[in-house]
Image (cartoon, rainbow, N blue to C red):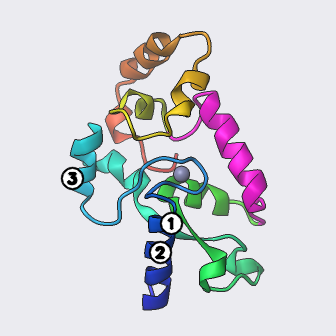
Amino acid sequence: MPNPLRQHRLAAYLSQSGRCFYCGAAMWLAGVEGFARKYGMSVGRAWFFRCTAEHLLARSEGGGDGQENIVAACCYCNRKRHERKRPMPPESYRRHVLGRLQRGRWHQAWVFRCADGLLPARTPAKMFPKGDQVHVFAQKQKEPNDESTSLFS
Ligand SMILES: [Zn+2]
């Protein structure tokens, strides 16, 4: 990554209190192992939460590398947004992500078992309004290949 972009990523990370622009999850800039320990997840899973420089207007659509076009987003939200040929506008995408988070359908169900503070405080309460966390988690734990699920499947 060119140096100015790295600096913009850091500036955005700091101004967003280390949280993803879209999903609000905590992110890491360096030290994936420490992050994994802090939130009680495997190192492989912690890679979802690497802080990336996200272009609000995609480069493919003429967006530049200036600070005004850069926010900090977790690796997962960034990749998912740019999987589409024409990425959703940032505000629509944020609503899309938050809506899916509230339905427990973003990242993977395992993130909701992680230590407090990974996701914004207001999210978990809304996420499972019927109090069925146990049900969701029990289902997830039965999957034999849970650990080896690829990052962006
Ligand atoms: Zn995110």
Q: Which residue is mark 3?
A: 34
Dot 3 or dot 2: first in sequence order is 2
Q: Which residue is mark 1?
A: 15
Crowding near the residue tagged with mark 2, few <14, some 14–19, many ≥20 C-alpha atoms within 10 Å:
some
Q: Measure how far apart labels 2 and 1 are at the Cα level.
A: 6 Å
Q: Position of residue 45 (x, y in %)?
A: 35, 46
Q: Measure how far apart labels 3 and 2 are at the Cα level.
A: 21 Å
Q: Position of residue 87 (x, y in %)?
A: 74, 63
Residue 9 seen anywhere in this rendered image of the structure? yes
> Mark 3 belongs to which amino acid?
Gly
Q: Residue at x 52, y 45 (%)?
A: 153
Tell me the SS state at disc 2: helix
> Mark 1 belongs to which amino acid?
Ser
Q: Is residue 41 left or right of residue 17?
A: left
Q: Which residue is mark 2?
A: 11
Up the image or down, 34 lies above or below 134; here it is below
Residue 41 seen anywhere in this rendered image of the structure? no
Image depth: mark 3 or mark 2 in front: 2
Image depth: mark 1 or mark 3 in front: 1
Q: Residue at x 28, y 66 (%)?
A: 30
Crowding near the residue tagged with mark 3, few <14, some 14–19, many ≥20 C-alpha atoms within 10 Å:
few
> Mark 2 belongs to which amino acid?
Ala
Instruction: Please give the range of residues in magenta.
Output: 86-107
- As drawn, the residue found furthest toward the bottom would be 3
